[in-house]
């Protein structure tokens, strides 16, 4: 066999095809399913986090010094293979959403997994049967900077807020830039948890997961008076006691506009950029869990709701607009 023959076999179309698959492994068939399964299984937490009972006499202003575990970000690091690039030579906008799937899965599973086996058994005893599902309701992404082929970047996801029905996750695409970090895109998503046809209240799931303190008696609200960010017309749900609750129609919801939506997303980008400067310092410190009272956590939840509510209401208004046209 001559050297030329050996060389031709080395660079045969089979070799080139194999090489192309290797450098684009992220985009080959079934890759998404396998990676999602990996991130789901690797982030399961069977034990509840150990959080000391806070001193309720402390004021929120002096007690909140470090980030509470519920509001911490998870990190998913990856690159952009050639198959994810568009005709402009950078990461296609459509591929951001598959990266969000993995990043959000890390965050949601790590938070709710300690509650799942115990809460589901309790729901069965209460008469709620069926399959448990965590369902993505909607997602919006704002693009700021392009990501080049094979460039390394990080996707960070965190809890922004929640109501009785929806939990809202904020995500950012981050890369190194001139000795620091910069935001390439920001995203906001909403999830609902179902047991059969029953909607599991988010705060109940978080309490069973050991990440949310029990609500003080003076702050408790009857289930029929609890509001949702995005109510659905004519929707009826059962409370934990088995009674039906009428959810208010969408025209009783939150008033918003597309201008407020854009303003809110810009706040996400600017706040995330500011947080990046202190990321390394905060990650190396021990979290002072005991300094977060229920009131402090609720204040952070309400702050996040103000950021998310305009987008959530606009999301409902858009669906109604197209439903009327259909």
Image (cartoon, rainbow, N blue to C red):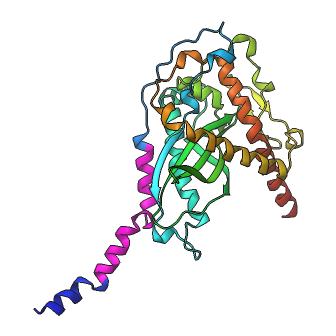
Residue at 41% x, 68% y is 24
Q: Position of residue 323 (x, y in %)?
A: 83, 58
45 lies left or right of 192? left
Q: Position of residue 309 (x, y in %)?
A: 77, 40
Q: Main secondary structure of the magenta part?
A: helix
Residue at 77% x, 47% y is 311
Of the pair 45 and 234, the residue shown nearer to us: 45
Give the answer, above or below, for where 184 lies relative to 103: below
Quarter of the image with the C terminus is bottom right
Give the answer, above or below, for where 107 lies relative to 242: below
**Which range of residues does the magenta coloring cover?**
14-40
Residue 215: tell me if it is visible. no
Q: Position of residue 87 (x, y in %)?
A: 58, 77
Q: Is residue 270 magenta?
A: no
Residue at 48% x, 37% y is 280
Q: Position of residue 181 (x, y in %)?
A: 54, 49
Of the pair 151 and 38, the residue shown nearer to us: 151
Give the answer, above or below, for where 172 lies relative to 125: below
Of the pair 177 and 147, the residue shown nearer to us: 177
Quarter of the image with the N terminus is bottom left
Residue at 17% x, 87% y is 6
């Amino acid at each position: 066999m001559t050297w030329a023959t050996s060389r031709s076999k080395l660079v045969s179309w089979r070799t080139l095809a194999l090489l192309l698959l290797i450098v684009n492994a992220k985009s080959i068939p079934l890759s998404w399913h396998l990676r999602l399964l990996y991130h789901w299984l690797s982030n399961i937490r069977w034990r509840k986090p150990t959080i000391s009972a806070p001193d309720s006499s402390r004021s929120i202003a002096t007690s909140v010094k470090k980030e509470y575990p519920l509001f911490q970000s998870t990190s998913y690091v990856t690159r952009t293979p050639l198959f994810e690039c568009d005709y402009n030579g950078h990461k296609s906008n459509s591929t951001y959403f598959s990266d969000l799937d993995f990043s959000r899965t890390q965050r949601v599973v790590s938070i709710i997994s300690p509650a799942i086996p115990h809460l589901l058994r309790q729901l069965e005893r209460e008469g709620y049967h069926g399959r448990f599902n965590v369902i993505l309701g909607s997602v919006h992404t704002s693009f700021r900077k392009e990501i080049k082929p094979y460039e390394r970047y990080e996707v960070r996801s965190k809890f922004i807020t929640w109501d009785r029905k929806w939990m809202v996750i904020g995500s950012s695409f981050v890369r190194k830039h001139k000795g620091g970090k910069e935001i390439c895109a920001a995203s906001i998503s909403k999830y609902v948890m179902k047991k059969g046809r029953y909607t599991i209240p988010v705060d109940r799931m978080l309490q069973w997961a050991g990440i949310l303190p029990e609500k003080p008696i003076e702050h408790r609200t009857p289930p029929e008076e609890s509001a949702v960010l995005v109510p659905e017309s004519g929707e009826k749900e059962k409370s934990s006691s088995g009674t039906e609750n009428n959810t208010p129609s969408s025209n009783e919801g939150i008033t918003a506009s597309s201008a407020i939506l854009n303003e809110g997303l810009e706040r996400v980008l600017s706040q995330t950029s500011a947080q990046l400067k202190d990321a390394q310092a905060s990650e190396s410190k021990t979290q002072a869990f005991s300094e977060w009272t229920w009131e402090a956590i609720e204040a952070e939840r309400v702050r996040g709701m103000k950021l998310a509510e305009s987008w959530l209401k606009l999301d409902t208004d858009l669906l109604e607009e197209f439903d009327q046209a259909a």
